[in-house]
Image (tube, coloured by chain):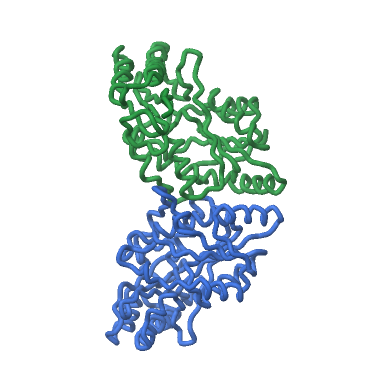
Chain colours: A green, B blue
Amino acid sequence: MRFISGIREMQQESDSLRAAGKRIGFVPTMGALHEGHLDLLRLSRQHCDVTVMSVFVNPTQFGPNEDFSRYPRDIARDAALAESAGCDILFTPDADEVYPPAYSTWVLEENLGNTLEGRARPTHFRGVTTVVAKLFHMVKPHCAVFGQKDAQQAAIIRRMVRDLHFDIELIIAPIRREPDGLAMSSRNMYLSDTGRQEALALSRSLRLAERFAADGGLDAGTLRAIVENEITRSGAVTLDYVAIVDAETLEERDDISGPPVLLALAARVENTRLIDNTILKVETIES
Amino acid sequence: MRFISGIREMQQESDSLRAAGKRIGFVPTMGALHEGHLDLLRLSRQHCDVTVMSVFVNPTQFGPNEDFSRYPRDIARDAALAESAGCDILFTPDADEVYPPAYSTWVLEENLGNTLEGRARPTHFRGVTTVVAKLFHMVKPHCAVFGQKDAQQAAIIRRMVRDLHFDIELIIAPIRREPDGLAMSSRNMYLSDTGRQEALALSRSLRLAERFAADGGLDAGTLRAIVENEITRSGAVTLDYVAIVDAETLEERDDISGPPVLLALAARVENTRLIDNTILKVETIES
């Protein structure tokens, strides 16, 4: 595995790879790698000849009261994990180079980012779209892999790629879960053993919703109430939102049949904000 | 000369050219070509193997009361001129493809665009940065040529390229003028013969400023007053602004010695808004 930090060096390496006819896959991360990230690497390897993983804790996607400073950083561990999963190039740009002095340019998706996570984290997605656009220009990939765990992020990046005509194929990887159902997240390490158990209410409520939805006949409001009840009944989890939205436009949906519906939720356990989601599958009788 | 309208086709053509080791030059225009545009083409040909010129009248850079609908369009004439100046590919994307349904992503430079032209045209530069980013992703050039005539646009594109790490070399071409000094502009064709004569006050005032500045000793305020007086004394020209700013940051400057200073102005002649500018050269004694 090669290590690259310089942006210019990364661009030149990508130019060389492209000139040699190699297909470049890209997995952007903030480090603190877990099996979910390694799934993204493995998917990239299936689709591409060379896989670049970036590790960059992006300051602009954290709010002023969020966990930027305490976000877990362990590049030696990340490098070992990335290499074990077949990463070819580990790209670790410096914040001072990613954000040059007096930088003033943003990439802004102004519709899909206003709901769900965007309500609790108003500047989050502006930071995400901006850094992803920058990283795309640095790595020049043919394809890029993101996780369905961050469903809204995936929808926004998809919209950005379409709107700005990035010539990049997006691949969205399914959520990777612990054996007991908890969605893998770098932030799970903030939880105590008790909190870790309480957090299972999130995935449990999604499984419940999936079962009810599959039977059909429920409207979004009832389904949401079932999920809310399941999450809050222990009293240990503070719900932020349960949303039932169109999976592509993120607009609220009353009817869960028809185009794919995303059930997304956010909740706080021991002051750690966790998210989870599922795409609902509804049994429908073809007319 | 090849004609391409499809975005996908343009991207594939650029991939092929790059794979063949060709250096791609790009000249984005809104058509209504004049010798100024052809200078950009010729510059691109000096630096690159293949030159792509786009003709796209970008709706998002016009304000609601501006001249989008009457902006001159004559693609046959433009094609003939482009070919005569050595253009290899004329790229004419459709607005419906450039701006897909329910598009919601913008590239926003939020500092340099608030002054000068940005005051009179508050959404103009957002439209410019967005469409240029899109076109860069479509044409994938190694270098791109813009005109110094739109000095603020050039500064903003330079900032965008730096901030978002576009791997593109920018070349800024000097202002091309008519023999009597009028800066070439597609909007000059809106002027009557009388208006055309009155418009000479703009370039005349810049020449005057250049002479005074070269002698040294004048502060920006005095120099600005000289320019304002020269433009307005006939009564036929309505001044919008005369600004003396840092050529890179566009911040107001009192002292015209030191880093390069841009003298930029905008004025209205017969309801047509014209702009012109010069970089002041001050004789300084090396210490």
Horizontal and vertical percent position of residue B116: 35, 66
Give the side of residue B215 with respect to residue A121, left or right: right
Residue at 31% across, 18% down: A226
Nearest the eye: A87 or B11: B11
Horizontal and vertical percent position of residue A204: 40, 15
Q: Is residue A30 above or below residue B23?
A: above
Residue at 45% across, 55% down: B96
Nearest the eye: A243 or A106: A243
Horizontal and vertical percent position of residue B210: 43, 80
Nearest the eye: A80 or B10: B10
Specify the quadrant that holds the N terminus of chain B: bottom right
Q: How many marks?
A: 0
Residue at 47% across, 57% down: B159
Nearest the eye: A76 or B101: B101
Give the side of residue A88 with respect to residue A198, left or right: right
Hey, which residue is sitting farthest front in the picture?
A: A287
Residue A124 seen anywhere in this rendered image of the structure = yes
Residue A199 seen anywhere in this rendered image of the structure = no
- Residue A14's image quarter? top right
Q: Is residue B287 above or below residue B19?
A: below
- Residue A150's image quarter? top left
Give the side of residue A215 with respect to residue B138, left or right: left
Residue at 40% across, 36% down: A62
Horizontal and vertical percent position of residue A216: 37, 21
